[in-house]
Structure formats: C-alpha cells, structure tokens
Image: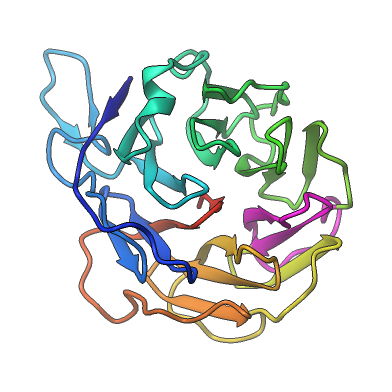
Amino acid sequence: MATTAHADAAPPRSTPGYWLAGADGGVFSFDAPFYGSGVGAPGPCAFNLPPPSNLLETMGCAAIASTPGGNGYWLVNSFRSATAFGQAGQALQAGCTSLNGAAGYWTGIASSPTGNGFFVASSNGAVAGCGDAVPFGGIMVPVGAPAVVGIAATPDGKGYWLAASDGGVFSFGDAQFYGSLGGMRLNLPVAGIAATPDGKGYWLTASDGGVFSFGDAQFHGSMGGTQINGLVVGIAATPDGKGYWLAASDGGVFSFGDAPFEGSMGGKPMNAAVVGIATFGSSVPG
C-alpha cells in the first residue's frame, strides 16, 4: 500500500536541518520544512487487522527518509506500507516492487539520488524499491538471527548497505564493504547506518549512542558511555559528511562535528517513541 499526502511549505533552507519521526506517525521538524504527518486513525502508521476485528494498532511507523533536496519525505509503516509528504509522491506514483510481498517487517528506508524513488529494507533482509530505486538483492535472515535494522544507499543509487542489529554490514550493487562489527561484543545492538557523501564509508550507531566509523567516515564523537534518557534509534549525516546527528527514542538529538543542533523533543510530551531521523540528502531509520 502506498499513499501520498500533500502539505504546503516553504522551500528547504540551505543549512541542514532535520526531521524526527514518531512511531505514531508524528513528524517534528527542526530548521526543516514541515510537510505533514501520519498521525491519526486510520493513518499511514496504523495497522488494520482483517475483519471481523476492528482493533487498530497505531504504533506502526518504523522509519523516515527525505528526498535529497529536502522537498518532501516518506514514512514507512512496519507492516509494509509507505506514505509520501510534500513533493515526495512521484516515487510512489511510479510503483513499488514487492513492497507488500516480503516476510518480516520494514525497518529502514533510503532515498534514491533523484528523490524519485527509495529503497526499503525488511527485518529479514529483503529489499524492495519504489520509483526509480531498483533493488540489487538482499539477505535471508534465519529465524532468531539478528534482524536488519537499517539501509543506506550509495550516491548514485546503484547500491546500498544493510546493517544488522549485531553490527553486521552487507553490501549490494556498487556499494563496497568497508568493515563491520559482526562478531564483536557490543554493549547494545546496532540501531542505524548512514553513508558518507562519496559512498566510500559509513557509520553505524548502537542503541547506547556508540558510533563506529568505517572507510572514509570520520569519527566525530558519540554518546557511548554517557547516560541518556532514551535508546538511540538512528543516525543522519550532514551533507558534507563532516558531522552527524543521533536521535533517541525520547526525542533527544545529539549533534557531532559540523552538525548543528537545531532542537529536539527531549523532555517534551509525545504520544509515541521517536523511531528515526532524516536530513536533506540523508536518511536513517530506526
């Protein structure tokens, strides 16, 4: 299922801002245009059980990604649906490959370089594409094995990386493998992945706020070893790759390198936990 929502907004600013997405479809914008949210029932983040049940679970959203130009974004439902906001709808109008057909639940989303498509990753390693995003394969995660938690695309959209909760990284298409945390002892599971602008490196973030850099990705700091109020759910890199943000489930945002802190939902009332963060040209699911 794929739907498009429309909202008028000013053009995105040239300085990087970011969006946070809640599990209930709430979208919170910080120095970034607001194009609407998925809050409401029935809404894009709700999961309708088949009749005769009328039970509505409204905690369905798992990830957010923006178009490279910042003129729209997508929310992905854990139960395999996507909704576009702003000018991100063309990707859905062009259709999706097996968006509803894979087992597992959707955990990550990454935009194509044109903004006219996106990849979505499933917890069991399946990858689907919408619009001009053409999948290059996936993995088959056995039952009980570490789930896939995120996806990051290469700059030309001809490849991507999948990150698993145990720190494993799997590369497809023209994405090169630069290392992983697979087989290493982690304090908490990996929660997200972000690629460098040239596609020659990537960062992994763990739920405790640890950050691990590979390839040409530079380490700019982390929250590892620091007490935080919520688990880290995602990472987003600045356009020049010289910084990144971490987002936590309580709405906290932590900035490193040249990533400016534009605000957060930390300490503010929310109806559901934050599940992801996205910025212009960058996206990381929770």
Residue 142 picture location, percent across and down: 69, 27
Quarter of the image where one finds residue 245: bottom right
Say if residue 80 shows up in the picture: no
Please identify the quadrant where the N terminus is shown: top left
Quarter of the image where one finds residue 237: bottom right
- Left or right, residue 117 beside residue 36: right
Residue 108 picture location, percent across and down: 53, 41
Name the residue: 88% across, 44% down.
177
Give the residues drawn in magenta, as a range. 180-205
Front in this rendered view, residue 143 or 207: 207
Say if residue 173 shows up in the picture: yes
Compared to 165, does 5 lie above or below? above
- Left or right, residue 197 beside residue 43: right
Name the residue: 73% across, 57% down.
196
The single residue placed furthest to the bottom in the displayed view is: 226
Magenta highlight on residue 147: no
- Left or right, residue 217 beside residue 33: right
Residue 183 picture location, percent across and down: 86, 52
Front in this rendered view, residue 273 or 113: 113
Residue 54 picture location, percent across and down: 10, 24
